[in-house]
Amino acid sequence: MDHLFNRLDGAYPNRWRAAFPNEYAVSNWREAWAEAFDEEGITTQMISDALRACRKTYDWPPSLAEFLKVCKPAVDADAALHEAVEQMRARQHGKDEWSHPAIFWAAVKVGEFDMLGQTFAALKPRFESALRKVLDGGEFQPVPARVPALQGPSAAESTREHGRNRLDGLRASEILKSITTGGSAEWAQRIIATEKATGRVPLNKLKIAKQAIQQV
């Protein structure tokens, strides 16, 4: 409570502290606000969010009733549902922006598939129920960044990779022939050394290199 008092004093210099002529007045404020926070289930996160809201909403220090209102702002369920559907679509491209994390978590409770696939009329009762549960919980975790879906290699990339492996194999086969007919195994030794250092030598190329060394 002392921290909250100091934050409000900093947000409203001269105006906030002027309402407390002595320590007795501060003590009364502390007890009244702490009791109200306990009865209303106000969390630390809600107080932090409310402080930011007060700076935007009130030119003068808020009363207890005003502060409680910004701790638990009323949410227009219809507007929240429209936002949830719109932002769930935008989230598929990593461009979602939520006015309040409670709207996001309510949408998560309903499920992305249903949020994007059902009609407004079908979604409304489910979303409103989910939103009430989230708001009653009081603790709002930040909206997490969307983790992009893992994508496999494109057809062109797969074809290029296959071509590189095939070419490496053909080159290795030619060198193996040369080694088995009296050539040098230095190439094979370099391949094995590269594999030990990087672990990135194609398996077929490494296999032929080991065969070459064994036959020298």
Image (cartoon, grey):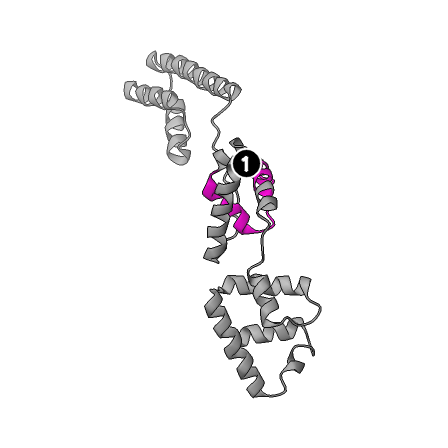
Where 171 falls versus 125 (above or below)? above
Q: Position of residue 175 (x, y in %)?
A: 40, 15
Left of 97 or right of it: where is 157? left
Tag 1: amino acid: Ala
Q: Is residue 66 visible?
A: yes
Q: In the structure shown, which secondary structural element does the residue marked by tag 1 occupy?
A: helix
Near-viewer residue (204 or 122) = 122
Identify which residue is drawn at 55% across, 87% down: 24
Quadrant of res 47? bottom right
Identify which residue is drawn at 50% across, 69% down: 37
Q: Quadrant of the C terminus?
A: top left
In the rendered structure, does residue 15 fall within the stretch colored magenta?
Answer: no
Q: Look at mark 1 in the image and give the residue it sits on.
A: 121
Identify which residue is drawn at 39% across, 21% down: 205
- Magenta segment boundaries in residue numbering: 83-111
Q: Position of residue 23 (x, y in %)?
A: 57, 87
Identify which residue is drawn at 49% across, 65% down: 42
Q: How many marks?
A: 1
Where 191 falls versus 36 (above or below)? above
Where 72 falls versus 4 (above or below)? above
